Image (cartoon, rainbow, N blue to C red):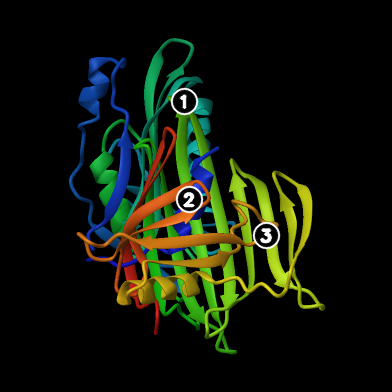
Amino acid sequence: MPAGIRLMLLIACATVALPTKNVQAEYTRGTDGWPEWVAESMANEARKPKLRKVKLPDDTLSTRIPGKPDEPQAIDSGWYFPSDIKAESPLECYIYTTDLDMSSLTNYLAETNIEAIGESYGTVDNRTIYHVDAGATSGYPYMALEWLYTVTGETQTLVAFTKVRVAVKSDIALACTHNAIGYRETFAAAFEDFVASTEYQGSDNPPYYEEIATMDINGMGFGVAYTTYTVDEDGDTKEYVAESSLLPTAASSLMYSDSISYSYSTPDHELISARQVDVENGEITNNLTLERNEDGDWVSSGTLQGGKPLEAVIDGEQTPDSNLGMIAMARDLFAGEEQSVTAKMWIPTADPTRFLDASLTRDDTEVERQGTVSLGPINISGGFDESGNMVDGKMTFGPITVDIRRVWSKGSVFE
């Protein structure tokens, strides 16, 4: 069984939600209201294309492209690979060797493709979000977005369909697009083969643990989180978390968000410093850092709510717990006789100016290692593995239900 969601990731996702075969969460709208031939065309598929090795001058990576690829073209921070997969329009894949936000890149590629179709054939109208999903493929977190729309020219109106899939891990992003009605399974399989066949020279200090978790918001919006733990030269642990989500707010409106956070903790799991950057619809909303000053007090500083400056001093006598510390507490709780445990956490999405009390209460009389995490009015119930790491959780707050599930992991949280 796949292993681990961070305990506090659920709280972060919950507060945002308020305003190995591949595993995924997905939403598909269907073709109601569209001509019958559109529904029939959605069933179009092609034979599985053969993978072909592509020569690249950059010897730090190699890949295979489905179909009959053209020569790769250099682009800003990467490569572009068009290929014929016998599916009416070419498969277009990309490798970016730089840090990119997954949902922002997914939306950008979709909008770029739709704009190009409009420039070639006419005015774009009747845009409908057809499909959204998120999951794990070959150890990469990925997101998918599909748009169904019309394009009206001088003499006729056409129906168009744009599909995008993006996988991002550390400083590499893999993406594919396709513009033809149907061929959904053909495209998904081609993307998965592309990701699986790409080899990249990664960091000299790889993580000792990594995991991918999916987030389902009311069965309509979907997110994915990628978490890693590495040990630096001083023996401290760096936790890195990249979270992305796609949330249809209407049939033709999409909210996309990304969050990058990282923190350092001692071998005893005490927090040393932390930083979080949140982006919504391509704009930075929060950029916050926590560290000690020369007096030994904690300083939470940066910008929030789109640019408002913040600097708050927190009593240095307080010792906030790292996420690893909270996981260790959960492990010990389920191994002992106590019923609950409380920790102080810095959760900038909830309140960056103070440390909040987060509690875990066990509820495992019937199901082993079940418990509830509480932060103020927010309660998240779920199951934990033997390490104390949450494997699934559910939060209900008013009309919002958030389900989070770990779908892939590698290594062990505690070395």
Q: Which residue is mark 2?
A: 13
Q: Amino acid at mark 3?
A: Arg
Where in the figure is residue 49, as x and y percent of width and height? 23, 51
Where in the figure is residue 314, as x and y percent of width and height? 73, 65
Residue 354's disc is: 3
Quarter of the picture containing the C terminus is bottom left
Q: Under tag 1, what secondary structure? A: loop
Residue 23's disc is: none
Label whose residue precedes the other's in the sequence (3 or 1): 1
Out of 31 and 74, give the one closest to the viewer.
Answer: 31
- Circle 1 packing at 10 Å, graded few (<14), some (14-19), many (20+), is some
Residue 177 figure quarter: top left
Where in the figure is residue 224, as x and y percent of width and height? 42, 53
User: Is residue 363 in view from this perspective?
Assistant: yes
Residue located farthest toward the top when viewing the structure as drawn: 155
Which of discs 3 and 2 lies nearer the camera? The answer is: 3
- Circle 2 packing at 10 Å, graded few (<14), some (14-19), many (20+), is many
Residue at image point 32% right, 72% down: 334
Label whose residue precedes the other's in the sequence (1 or 2): 2
Q: Amino acid at mark 1?
A: Ser
Q: Amino acid at mark 2?
A: Cys
Out of 414 and 60, give the one closest to the viewer.
Answer: 414
Residue 34 figure quarter: top left
Residue 252's disc is: 1
Where in the figure is residue 53, as x and y percent of width and height? 32, 65
Which of discs 3 and 1 lies nearer the camera? The answer is: 3
Label whose residue precedes the other's in the sequence (3 or 2): 2
For the residues labelled 3 and 1, the Cα–Cα distance comes to: 39 Å
